[in-house]
Image (tube, rainbow, N blue to C red):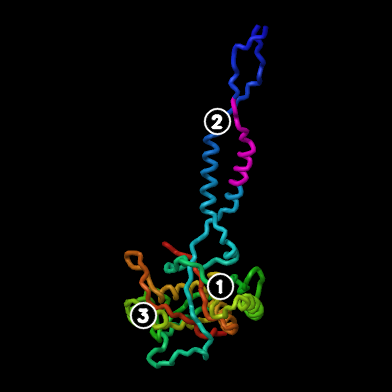
Amino acid sequence: MRMRHEVEHEKNELNMTSMIDIVFLLLVFFVMTFKIVEMEGDFTVRMPLAGDSNATSDVTDLPLKLRLRADNDGKLTSMSLNEINLGTDFTKLRANVIGLVGTDEPAEEDDGPEIEIDTDYNLRYAYVIQAITSVSGYRDDTDQVVKLIERIKFAKPRR
Amino acid sequence: MKVKSKKPNLAEGDLTPMIDMTFQLIAFFMVLINFSQTESNERVVLPSSQLVKPPEKPLEFPIILHVAKDGEIILGGDSYTTETLSTGLRRELAVLRAEKKSPKDANVIIRGHQDVAAGQVQEIIRVAQDQQLEQFALRAKEDRS
């Protein structure tokens, strides 16, 4: 007589292999496509074509003029704001802008002070962005952005 | 008589912690993945600025122009110079007009390389102005230092 002494506990085991395969595929996909993206932001420049603007050409509302000069390598050599020579010091530029427009909250978007940037053709773009940063505001001690000039435009390109 | 069937003795490791970890990793990468990389171009290294912040809502009707160091302009995968850019812009504006929008509603996002000549960017703005575009965004990367 055949006797069965032990009842075999049948283990109900899932076969994990295929799941792990898929999971690793997913993992590899995400690792490969992962790229740390730097945070980016914009400076908005509103520049309608000159001539058709309905802006009243008020003499008292002339824009500030920022002139950026460069050497042959595109390096900034000097800046001047409304003929005030500032050298290459962007903090000086910011101090002058604060002196000219004050730190009051700028009026409505279309009504604040305006600045026109006139740059040498071969000046490196990074300097222009640095200048725009300096004139458009700064971060105060509490890391809040204090806005200065929001209306920025470019003069005609110099060839 | 006791008959014992001989089963091969498989040494099975416990896979649970490994699967746990792997799922954690997948979740991590899934959350961080950013598919909006179509906006970026490896030839452009943006200048940095302390003031820019990522926009709260994306700009409407963006036209993204990548400006490489040598002044080459990339719009929608095609490469242009300042002389030929107007054809590319006209193509974009045709799409815009089909949606009953005027060029004034479009935002031209300029992603200029930090070492490109500033005059090149000015030229691009001038070409875009000729196409009645008037809203521009100069893109920079956030500098938290």
Count residues near mark 3 (Cα–Cα under 10 Å), then give few for <14, some for 14-19, many for 20+: few
Residue mark closest to the camera, 1 vs 3: 1
Q: Residue at x 61, y 78 (%)?
A: B97
Q: Secondary structure at mark 2?
A: loop
Q: Position of residue B3 (x, y in %)?
A: 66, 11
Count residues near mark 1 (Cα–Cα under 10 Å), then give few for <14, some for 14-19, many for 20+: some
Q: Residue at x 57, y 29 (%)?
A: B13
Q: Position of residue A51 (x, y in %)?
A: 52, 91
Q: Is residue A21 on the magenta stretch?
A: yes
Residue tagged 2: B14
Residue tagged 1: B61
Chain identity of mark 1: B
For residue A141, side relative to residue B119 (left or right):
left
N-term-proximal mark, 2 vs 1: 2
Q: Nearer the viewer, residue B76 or B117?
A: B76
Classify A94 as above or below B42: below
Chain identity of mark 2: B
Q: Nearer the viewer, residue A86 or B88?
A: B88
Q: Are marks 3 and 2 on the same chain?
A: no
Residue A72 visible from this viewpoint: no
Residue tagged 3: A107
Give the Cα distance between marks 3 and 2. Answer: 67 Å
Residue type, mark 1 in image: Phe
